[in-house]
Image (cartoon, helix red, strand yellow):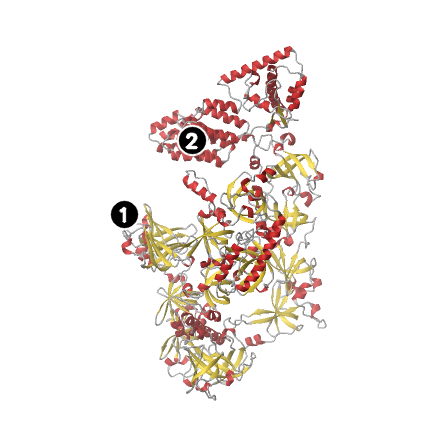
């Protein structure tokens, strides 16, 4: 054969060249190409065109024999853009979204592609088209079965479409014929990783379409099931990535293997024949770095190819560590065949063997989010820029999104900007990075995604198209919504096209939005769009008494159903429709009508609501609550500016858009900031940190004053007049100014009067000039008039108390407000000037040029074109300036509104800055005044800072001389040398004169130095708590004594409470051993945000109070490290934590510990109330389990154990139960263990795992530890060996313990083709073969697996033991075990023949064979011995080999026999049907005998071949027997009543009667007796095709037989398919009836009942159906159901008479007739 193959190769293959030749050729060519490449590099430094030519030349002229071609090195690394994508380009894709007909694919560099259902593979497309054409409704797997989000796969660009907006749409394909287009059968090598699709599913595997003509690829099922954990089979069309295991017949046959980790790790080698024409994305390659550029890397891989790695696919962790010549593992991302550009990736998630990539980032979905404060980290001019978001997340801006679409990119300007605002547009799973945009048009879009829209929102859009069912409205780029036809107007429009035209702008309100499905429903009903009533967006909004507009969706007899927003709906009952009685609602109301509805009842949980139209119109109940009442006074809010007016802003409180007002004077505490903020705010802006200070039925008023907001949040307010008391201090603002005084308003609408005399400590002549309207003040109540509900307040600074630090807080707030104004103006201004001014700050130095120098100076700067830069005469004093002179100036103030910068060129201010020390005092000079703020300089330090012009809220200036002026000197004290809130400027306090100040106690405490370590003090016990004692010391401070520092350690007794020995009020001597920080509540956090003080930590232990004892302060870390694991220590109980289920203890003042739940319980009875085990402050002894440094604490145990040891008993908690493993148990000290089902008890029980539940506590015996997991036992014999009862099922530790013939119990592990596997112990599993499992004949192991689920308890007998292999063979047969068979009799399975029955069956066959042979011998002439011998020798060469049937193979020496030709007659071939070529009498024998004769055993053959001398009498007897047999055979053939015995006889009879269903059914029965199920099915299918279509009854009989067959031997699915086919070809009613009878006979009651229910619906006019169903119910004993059925039948059938007659006469057996009559009685009555 080998020679024939070489001479005549199949398929025209050529001779294979020898291996050595290939090697020589390849090395030669490689060297040749390398030299060529080096020679040409000098020549081609020109344009890309030359490169292209060279490449082409290279390809055609100097191509390697195996097609290997080198590619040129890329000049600049850049990402791939849409314009560079070409058809035929191969890419690695990642599934983003999967729909039924299309997959959205994430491609490298942020590209998107779409994979259509048509582009999977040819076999799948064919399957789809067949499905469309055929009437069968077989289920075909859709795309979600094949693809899942995050799945990586190879694809090819099949087509580039132009989308509606003009953008390019990339259509992809995974068709192997396109993906593997470049591969040929000869190029296939073992180890290659290929992608393909399942073409067909075979018995033992799958034919995979790899797209190569003439190559068949086979993937064995075993390979898939072994490597893939899930047992689901692959389906036709499924995409698979597999590795070539073996290539046969020159690539015509390929065997594949399927193991995702192996495939992912497989590295492409040059020996596998990869080249630039057939290189595939997703391949792993080893590469060498050729060049490192700032935009990416250039690599060499597969010995000679070049590839590029763009900056998006460099590993971020190693980005700076790449060096030339370095070795890296890379993954091929894309291959562009025409330009031979290869893109690679070094990202770990593509190189590591993962089948899925995360499609959403770790921080969650952020698409559409606008992010401020982003930094640009790098700019790649050909690709885009990298940003760093504030949370350190990296993001990428494509170069098209660095600018507006009609502008040019100014890269320098972008890099110069310190911060950027961007909008996240998308997340690319394959690049694992956010793609963002810097376009202002994108950032300012109100809606970027459907998620940005909320129900109830009013939106504006453009009409895009009018449809029959409504109108499509375009809101923005890709967001469109549907206005249903009923919502086009308040009334139903007959001709909507007359009112609406395409392109028309419309205002709508959102009804509902489904972001996941991208569905948006809008309404154009004017009543809904302009409604000012509260919106019901959820059932929670619909509180009883509220009124809202809704629209009718359904009008019924019992009332109307009204819908609101987000599918919130309710019922208006008949009596609530109107004050007038409504009889027919349909006549009064219509669908789509908008009406006011009032909520009467609402149950949000059940989503039910009762409404009233009547109450909403008449208002007969209490007035509807207005939306204002949802706003709580004092609560922080966020609101949107709706409209600007002269006196303030109209706001909408978010998210409910409740209307409110924000007066201009309430924008700031600084009156000069209020108009600035008003000016900078625009409609649509959102303002945060607002507080509602007053509300009534008409309006809500908001404030942004920080001081007022603080007073409301801290509760320093009076909510009502009754709460006001004399002496109370409140924060308010000037509401009105009169000649006799000012009115001060406070939150909650309270107003007090300040007379002229109480306005200030100074004498005021004119009250109208002292204060400004809206000025924030601190007032103190002096008088109350209870009757008239009036009160007087004073604003005198001497009478009100201010908090220390409040001035600095106000300064910081005021400057932050100014900075906010600057930023708002800068972002809104298109020009660069304001943005540049916003970047300037006080104290910054500038290089300027003098423009004019007349009474001051005006400067100009190249960087600040258009700005006015000026210095007053005081700031140029002593400096002579000439126009054009270059100077250095320092900024004093930046006025962004007037674009003016005030500077100074004084040398003392421009000089080098000196550092400041905190709390030091300086003399300062005012350099510039700007309304409420002033810029000052500190001595000669050249430091500038900003202060407020007033030190107190109530401070007033009656004359100009009292106000601060430039040049004035002040005394200042530095609080912070560099304050972050002041942009690095020093924070100072100031005053004009320095009066002596009295220090208060509070100040003394806050500034006290505290007590020294080791100091002994006297104190009085203030409080005694279980864990500590508070002691008031002599100096008034409070000290703390830890529970461990009360009693001498040696005297501490377990269970005692040390603190109980100390009494409250007793005087104690204590010693300072440390201190801890605590926050003070003495000051308000508004004025002292960071104030903490130290509480001294004391000891009362006598031995430590001795001064001679030198105490040393030991650091916590050192103290912690002194504890050793296993050491027993004394602890004090702090508390039991119910959430973490652990006991928290304290060891000393700085070390705490925790005792986990399992380490604190000794008895399982205590599990229900662990908190009652220990009391607070109680002393307990515990062992150290672990010393943790972060956080610094000890893990402890109070059970006496500190680690798990083999052979010990411990408590455990059940995690869960797993049928194949047993119990998973959580152990103390972080351990986990498993209990095998055989270790649960000493006496096995059925369903062993059912008695265990999650979190159940158990005592466990530790058998041993394997790989960090403990093997446990719950057997009483292990836990309590002394008290345990005798063991019924002993523990089997090794195979040596077992004996052959031993009866042993075990649990079923699994059932497979090899038999039933039974778990005898945790480590030993026995097997019972199928023949040894049951006495029934089972042709499919699945019958056993359904009756033997895992953990079924079985009794078995050991047949044999293989100690060497550790194998145990078992028997489950009743003969061996003495137990009933494992399969029930109800299955009606045939018994397997054994013993005598088997011998009887075999001997019967033997007799038949012997009889036929003897007949043959008698008819032949006697043969001489010599002749016989000769025949025997000839037999070696001639004759036909015939093998036994399966059931005869058990006979000894019966492997194969040769039928020998007789010496007398010419040799002949015997056929299975008993026909022979010579028609002599001797050759005629019954067909069944002939079949048996063909497979006769060796003994018979030997017997017939040996020459025996017979007497004449014997010869005559044989002749008579042969004649008798022949006569009997003729009689059988003539008698039609006799049933045929073999297939041939049936075939002969069927030729005569092809339409006889009886004959076909007998033929089926013949096969079923031999358990040949498939043959029986085939006979039925033949019968259905053969029987004439006119013979309906005959066909029906076959269908019924087939249904019976599928019911007994098939699956539910196969039965359903046969039933559906039968319905198509027969009358449906009889088929239904027959299947119902089949179900009833096979006791499938549930299925039968379901079928009858379908029948009475479908054939309700047919009385036979009702009779049949009734009989069925009566047979089941369900007389009540039968009675109910009778009532239904009476309604459904035409006339009662016929019904009664048919019920009494037909279809009811005599035993049920009396029941039927009983049913009739109530009907007639």
Q: Is residue 916 above or below residue 1028?
A: below
Task: Tell me, yes or no, if residue 1160 can be seen here.
Answer: no
Read off the residue under disc 2: 1631
The image shows residue 1632 at horizontal and vertical percentages of 42, 32
Dot 2 or dot 1: first in sequence order is 1
The image shows residue 570 at horizontal and vertical percentages of 37, 51
Furthest toward the top, the residue is 1513
Nearer to the camera, 199 or 1372:
199
Q: Choose mark 2 or mark 1, whichever is in front.
A: 2
- Residue at x-position 57% and y-position 23%: 1469
Give the number of callouts. 2
The image shows residue 1655 at horizontal and vertical percentages of 40, 34
Query: Any mark on residue 587, and which?
Result: 1
- Residue at mark 2 to residue at mark 1: CA–CA distance: 49 Å
Q: Quadrant of residue 480?
A: bottom left
Q: Quadrant of residue 1422?
A: top right
């Amino acid at each position: 054969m080998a020679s024939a193959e070489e001479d005549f190769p199949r398929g025209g293959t050529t001779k294979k060249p020898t291996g050595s030749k290939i090697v020589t050729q390849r090395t030669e060519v490689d060297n040749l190409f390398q030299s060529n490449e080096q020679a040409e590099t000098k020549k081609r430094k020109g344009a890309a065109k030359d490169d292209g030519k060279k490449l082409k030349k290279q390809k055609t002229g100097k191509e390697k024999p195996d097609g290997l071609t080198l590619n040129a090195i890329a000049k600049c690394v850049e990402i791939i853009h849409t314009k560079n994508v070409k058809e035929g380009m191969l890419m690695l894709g990642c599934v983003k979204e999967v729909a039924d007909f299309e997959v959205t694919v994430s491609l490298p560099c942020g590209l998107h592609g779409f994979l259509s259902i048509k582009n999977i593979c040819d076999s799948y497309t064919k399957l789809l088209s067949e499905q469309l054409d055929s009437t069968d409704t077989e289920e075909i797997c859709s795309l979600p079965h094949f693809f899942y989000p995050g799945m990586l796969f190879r694809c090819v660009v099949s087509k580039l479409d132009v989308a509606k907006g003009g953008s390019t749409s990339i259509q992809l394909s995974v068709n192997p014929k396109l993906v593997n287009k470049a591969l040929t059968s000869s190029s296939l090598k073992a180890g290659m990783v290929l992608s393909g699709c399942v073409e067909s599913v075979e018995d033992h595997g799958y034919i995979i379409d790899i797209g190569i003509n003439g190559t068949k690829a086979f993937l064995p099922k075993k390979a898939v099931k072994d490597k893939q954990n899930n047992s689901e089979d692959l389906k036709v069309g499924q995409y698979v990535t597999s590795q070539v295991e073996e290539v046969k017949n020159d690539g015509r046959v390929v065997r594949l293997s399927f193991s995702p980790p192996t495939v992912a790790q497989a590295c492409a080698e040059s020996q596998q024949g990869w080249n630039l024409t057939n290189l595939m994305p997703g391949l792993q390659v080893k590469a060498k770095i050729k060049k490192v550029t700032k935009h990416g890397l250039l690599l060499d891989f597969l010995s000679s190819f070049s590839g590029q790695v763009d900056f998006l696919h460099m590993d971020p962790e190693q980005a700076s560590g790449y060096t030339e010549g370095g070795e890296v593992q890379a993954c091929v991302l894309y291959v562009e065949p025409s330009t031979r550009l290869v893109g690679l990736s070094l990202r770990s998630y593509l190189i590591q063997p993962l089948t899925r990539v995360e499609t959403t980032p770790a921080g969650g979905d952020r698409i559409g989010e606008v992010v401020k404060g982003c930094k640009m980290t790098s700019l790649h001019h050909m690709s885009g820029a990298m940003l760093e978001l504030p949370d350190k997340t990296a993001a990428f801006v494509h170069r098209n999104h660095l600018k507006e679409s009609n502008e040019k990119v100014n890269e320098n300007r972008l890099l110069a900007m310190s911060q950027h605002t961007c909008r996240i547009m998308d997340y690319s799973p394959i690049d694992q990075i956010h793609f963002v945009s810097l376009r202002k048009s994108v950032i300012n879009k109100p809606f970027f995604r459907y998620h940005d829209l909320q129900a109830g929102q009013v939106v504006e859009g453009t009409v895009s198209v009018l449809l029959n069912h409504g109108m499509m409205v375009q809101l923005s780029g890709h967001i469109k919504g549907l206005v249903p036809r009923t919502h086009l107007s308040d009334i139903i429009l007959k001709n909507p096209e007359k009112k609406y035209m395409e392109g028309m702008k419309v205002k709508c309100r959102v009804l509902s939005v489904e972001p996941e499905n991208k569905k948006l429903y809008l309404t154009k009903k004017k009543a809904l769009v302009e409604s000012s009533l509260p919106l019901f967006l959820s059932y929670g909004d619909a509180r009883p008494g509220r009124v809202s507009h809704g629209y009718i969706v359904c009008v019924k007899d019992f009332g109307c159903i009204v819908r609101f927003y987000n599918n919130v709906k309710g019922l208006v009952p008949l009596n609530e429709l109107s004050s007038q009685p409504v009889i027919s609602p349909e006549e009064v109301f219509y669908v789509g009508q908008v009406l006011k509805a009032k909520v009467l009842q609402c149950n949000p949980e059940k989503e039910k609501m009762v409404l009233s139209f009547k109450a909403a119109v008449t208002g007969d109940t209490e007035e509807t609550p207005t939306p204002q009442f949802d706003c709580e006074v004092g609560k922080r809010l966020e609101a949107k500016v709706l409209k600007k007016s002269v006196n303030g802003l109209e706001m909408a409180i978010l998210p409910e858009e409740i209307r409110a007002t924000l007066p201009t004077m309430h924008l700031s505490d600084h009156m000069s900031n209020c108009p600035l903020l008003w000016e900078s705010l625009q409609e649509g802006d959102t303002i945060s940190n607002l507080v509602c200070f007053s509300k009534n039925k008409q309006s809500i008023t908001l404030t942004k004053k920080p001081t007022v907001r603080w007073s409301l949040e801290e509760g320093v307010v009076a909510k009502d007049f009754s709460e006001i008391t004399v002496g109370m201090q409140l924060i308010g603002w000037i509401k009105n100014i009169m000649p006799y005084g000012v009115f001060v308003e406070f939150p909650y609408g309270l107003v007090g009067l300040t007379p002229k005399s109480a306005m200030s400590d100074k004498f005021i002549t004119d009250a109208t000039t002292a204060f400004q309207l809206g000025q924030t003040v601190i007032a103190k109540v002096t008088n109350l008039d209870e009757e008239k509900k009036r009160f007087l307040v004073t604003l005198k600074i001497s009478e009100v108390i201010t908090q220390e630090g409040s001035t600095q807080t106000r300064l910081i707030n005021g400057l932050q407000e100014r900075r906010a104004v600057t930023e708002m103006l800068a972002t809104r201004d298109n020009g660069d000037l304001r943005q540049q001014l916003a970047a300037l700050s006080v104290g910054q130095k500038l290089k300027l040029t003098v423009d004019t120098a007349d009474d001051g100076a005006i400067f100009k700067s190249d960087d600040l074109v258009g700005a006015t830069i000026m210095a007053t005469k005081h700031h140029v004093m002593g400096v002579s300036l000439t126009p054009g002179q270059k100077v250095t100036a320092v900024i004093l103030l930046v006025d962004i509104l007037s674009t003016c910068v005030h500077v100074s060129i004084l040398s003392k201010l421009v000089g080098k800055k000196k550092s400041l020390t905190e709390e030091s005092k300086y003399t300062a000079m005012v350099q510039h005044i700007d309304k409420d703020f002033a810029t000052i300089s500190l001595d000669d330090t050249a430091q500038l800072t900003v202060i407020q012009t007033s030190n107190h809220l109530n401070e007033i200036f009656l004359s100009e001389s009292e106000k601060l002026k430039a040049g004035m000197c002040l005394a200042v004290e530095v609080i912070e040398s560099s304050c972050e809130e002041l942009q690095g400027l020093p924070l100072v306090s100031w005053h004009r004169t320095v009066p002596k100040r009295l220090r208060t106690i509070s100040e003394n405490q806050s500034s006290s130095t505290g007590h020294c370590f080791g100091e002994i003090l006297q104190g009085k016990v203030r409080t005694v708590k279980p864990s500590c004692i508070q002691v008031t010391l002599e100096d008034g401070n409070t000290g703390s004594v830890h529970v461990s520092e009360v009693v001498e350690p040696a005297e501490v007794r377990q269970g005692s409470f040390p603190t109980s020995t100390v009494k409250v009020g007793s005087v104690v001597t204590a010693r300072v051993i440390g201190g801890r920080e605590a926050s003070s509540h003495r000051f308000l956090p508004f004025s002292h945000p960071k104030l903490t003080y130290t509480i001294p930590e004391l000891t009362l232990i006598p031995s430590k109070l001795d001064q001679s004892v030198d105490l040393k302060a030991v650091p916590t870390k050192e103290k912690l490290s002194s504890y050793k694991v296993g050491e027993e220590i004394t602890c004090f109980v702090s508390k039991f934590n119910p959430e973490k289920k652990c006991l928290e203890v304290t060891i000393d003042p700085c070390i705490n510990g925790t005792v986990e739940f399992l380490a604190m319980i000794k008895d399982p009875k205590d599990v229900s109330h662990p908190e009652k085990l220990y009391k607070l402050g109680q002393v307990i002894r515990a062992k150290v389990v672990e010393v943790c440094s972060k956080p610094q604490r000890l893990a402890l145990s109070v059970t006496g154990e500190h680690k798990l040891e083999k052979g010990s008993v411990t408590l455990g908690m059940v995690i869960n139960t797993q049928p194949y493993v047993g119990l998973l148990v959580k152990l103390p000290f972080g351990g986990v263990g498993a209990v095998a089902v055989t270790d649960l008890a000493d006496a096995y029980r059925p369903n062993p795992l059912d008695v265990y539940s999650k979190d159940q506590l158990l005592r466990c015996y530790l058998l041993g530890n394997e790989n960090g997991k403990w093997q446990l036992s719950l057997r009483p014999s292990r836990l309590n060996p002394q008290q345990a009862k005798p063991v019924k099922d002993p523990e089997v530790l090794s195979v040596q313990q077992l004996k052959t013939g031993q009866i042993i119990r075990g649990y079923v592990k699994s059932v497979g083709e090899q038999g039933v596997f039974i778990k005898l112990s945790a480590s030993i599993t026995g097997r019972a073969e199928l023949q040894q499992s049951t006495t029934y004949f089972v042709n499919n192991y699945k019958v056993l697996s359904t009756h033997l689920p895992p953990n079924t308890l079985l009794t078995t007998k050991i047949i044999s033991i293989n100690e060497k292999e550790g194998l145990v063979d078992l028997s489950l047969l009743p003969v061996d075990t003495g137990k009933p068979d494992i399969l029930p009799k109800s299955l009606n399975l045939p018994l397997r023949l054994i013993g005598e029955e088997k011998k009887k069956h075999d001997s019967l066959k033997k007799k038949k064979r012997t009889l036929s042979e003897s007949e043959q011998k008698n008819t032949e002439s006697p043969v001489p011995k010599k002749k016989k011998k000769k025949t025997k020798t000839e037999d070696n060469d001639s004759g036909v080999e015939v093998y036994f049937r399966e059931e005869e193979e058990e006979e000894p020496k019966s492997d194969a026999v040769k039928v020998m030709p007789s010496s007398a007659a010419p040799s002949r071939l015997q056929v299975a049907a008993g026909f022979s070529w010579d028609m002599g009498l001797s050759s005629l024998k019954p067909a069944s005998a002939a079949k048996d004769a063909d497979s006769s055993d060796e003994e018979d053959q030997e017997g017939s071949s040996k020459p025996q001398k017979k007497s004449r009498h014997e010869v005559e007897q044989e002749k008579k027997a042969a004649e008798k047999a022949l006569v009997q055979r003729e009689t059988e053939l003539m008698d039609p009543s006799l049933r045929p015995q073999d297939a041939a006889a049936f075939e002969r009879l069927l030729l005569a009667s092809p339409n006889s269903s009886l004959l076909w059914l007998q033929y089926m029965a013949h096969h079923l007796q031999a358990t040949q199920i498939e043959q029986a099915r085939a006979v039925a299918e033949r019968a259905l095709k053969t029987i004439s279509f006119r013979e309906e009854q005959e066909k029906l009989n076959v269908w019924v037989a087939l249904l019976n067959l599928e019911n007994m031997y098939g699956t539910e699915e196969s039965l359903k398919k046969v039933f559906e086919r039968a319905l198509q070809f027969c009358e449906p009613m009889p088929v239904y009836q027959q299947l119902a009878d089949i179900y009833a006979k096979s006791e499938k009651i549930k299925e039968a009942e379901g079928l009858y229910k379908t029948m009475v619906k479908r054939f309700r006019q047919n009385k036979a159906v009702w009779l049949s169903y009734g009989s069925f119910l009566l047979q089941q004993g369900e007389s009540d159901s039968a009675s109910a059925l009778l009532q239904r039948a009476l309604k459904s059938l035409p006339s009662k008479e016929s019904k009664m007659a048919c019920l009494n006469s037909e279809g009811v057996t005599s035993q049920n007739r009396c029941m039927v009559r009983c049913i009739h009685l109530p009907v007639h009555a």
